[in-house]
Image (cartoon, helix red, strand yellow):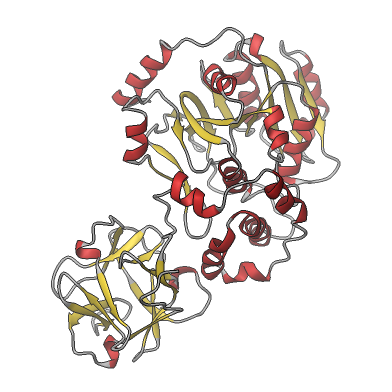
Amino acid sequence: MYSDSVLCSLCRCKNKLYPDNLPRTSVVIVFHNEAWSTLLRTVHSVIDRSPHTLLEEIVLVDDASERDFLKRPLEQYVRRLEVPVRVVRMEQRSGLIRARLKGASLSTGQVITFLDAHCECTTGWLEPLLARIKQDKSTVVCPIIDVISDDTFEYMAGSDMTYGGFNWKLNFRWYPVPQREMDRRKGDRTLPVRTPTMAGGLFSIDRDYFQEIGTYDAGMDIWGGENLEISFRIWQCGGTLEIVTCSHVGHVFRKATPYTFPGGTGQIINKNNRRLAEVWMDEFKNFFYIISPGVTKVDYGDITSRTGLRQKLQCKPFSWYLENVYPDSQIPRHYYSLGEIRNVETNQCLDNMARKENEKVGIFNCHGMGGNQVFSYTANKEIRTDDLCLDVSKLNGPVMMLKCHHLKGNQLWDYDPVKLSLIHVNSNQCLDKANEEDSQVPCVKDCTHTRSQQWLLRNVTLPEVF
């Protein structure tokens, strides 16, 4: 279940002492058509593995479930539990964001802890979270999220060596904890990790601070994007977001969403992401819009109150967030071009083809819809797609996509805006159209400056950096 390094950290965590007068928490759990066993597993693990002196109540918010056992039978069951548990009903399907806001508004604890309805808390999960908030109420804390198999319900340890980030499409992703954060903690893995973003399902926050920073954006619908929005807001408005490595909570990661999204999943997530981009990302919102041009056609509603909140709290710009909180972000802060890279002869575009690290880059008919055909030619002279850079390790290729290492070498490219050539510096060869053997894979060849080696970069600005 746990590796030796995790066991070692857990041993040191067990020896930590916490103050006696920790704040009490309300645990808010939203559910919609949740299975009886997973919901009750969550509730009982909170009750059984939390000191009752720290547990104000459990608030179960039913987001318009249709299953009969989640109605009167659930209410009768929770009345018999030794901790106050109440069931609150949404009048109509409102989604995670508004249901959580309802639960938070009805709760009474000094700290609000949000959990998903398919979790299992471990012994000692709560005290480390509350201790950090007692130290500093503007610190928002998350546990390490362990994995519960959705096939067997086996409990498997998560990693204390990953933290939250996001990719070019504003999807939350786990990434390795960078060396700078290891250095800040002086190698003590029991100390909290400062994380740029949180997954969003499981976290604790001081009630007054939650109100002060504007709770959730109630203009967002159902689910999606709210975790990045609150993460940006916490950091940009003077707070701190941490993963508390001595707190572990298991979570069932489902293969598919078991419920429907009114209006369609894509439409809702696009609306939510548009709101967070417009309010918090400043000029970097354009980066996101080039990746996902369809987002700009979505009606995102009125954001006046959210931009007013940002002014009132005197929040820092998104460039500050990228420089100081997330310097290893996949978004390059300085770049010469962003968009398609089009071959003059074939009129085809570089395309990552949704391939992964250590696979070849592709080339395909240009579609003008962003996504897999958006590449950035950065001020470091990398050609990157998200966190992958075009890399050539030997003469005549192949052109691979490897993790960007920022050390130049095999990932260093010169662009000649007159000859329109992309020159791989180490091999002194030019990027060329696909070989006949593989029509969807570009190659590098000796530079001849023919049309097949000419590339048009979208919005190229050389030599200035914008």
Q: Nearer the viewer, residue 167 or 62?
A: 167
Dividing the picture into quarters, in which one does residue 74 lie? Answer: top right
Badge count: 0
User: What residue appears at the point 69 percent right and 49 percent down from the top-left corner?
Assistant: 311
State the residue at coordinates (39%, 31%).
Answer: 160
Q: Percent position (x, y) of residue 38?
A: 62, 30
- Residue at the extreme top of the image, as rendered: 20
Between 366 and 112, the residue placed more toward the observer is 112
At a point 47% along the width and 9% down the height, the residue shown is 17
Q: Nearer the viewer, residue 188 or 227?
A: 188
- Res. 172 visible in picture: no
Please state, as top left, top right, bottom left or bottom right, where the C terminus lies in the image. Answer: bottom left
Which x, y percent locates residue 65? 77, 40
Q: Is residue 97 above or below residue 303?
A: above
Q: Is residue 92 left or right of residue 307?
A: right
Work out whether 308 lies above or below 353: above
361 sits left or right of 228 in the view: left
**Residue 96: x and y, percent?**
70, 42
Q: Is residue 456 visible?
A: yes
Q: Is residue 248 left or right of residue 431?
A: right
Quadrant of the image containing the N terminus:
top left
Residue 309 x/y as whole percent: 72, 47
Residue placed at 61% from the left, 24% from the top?
Answer: 41
465 w.r.t. 236: above or below: below
Looking at the image, the residue that sits furthest to the right is 91
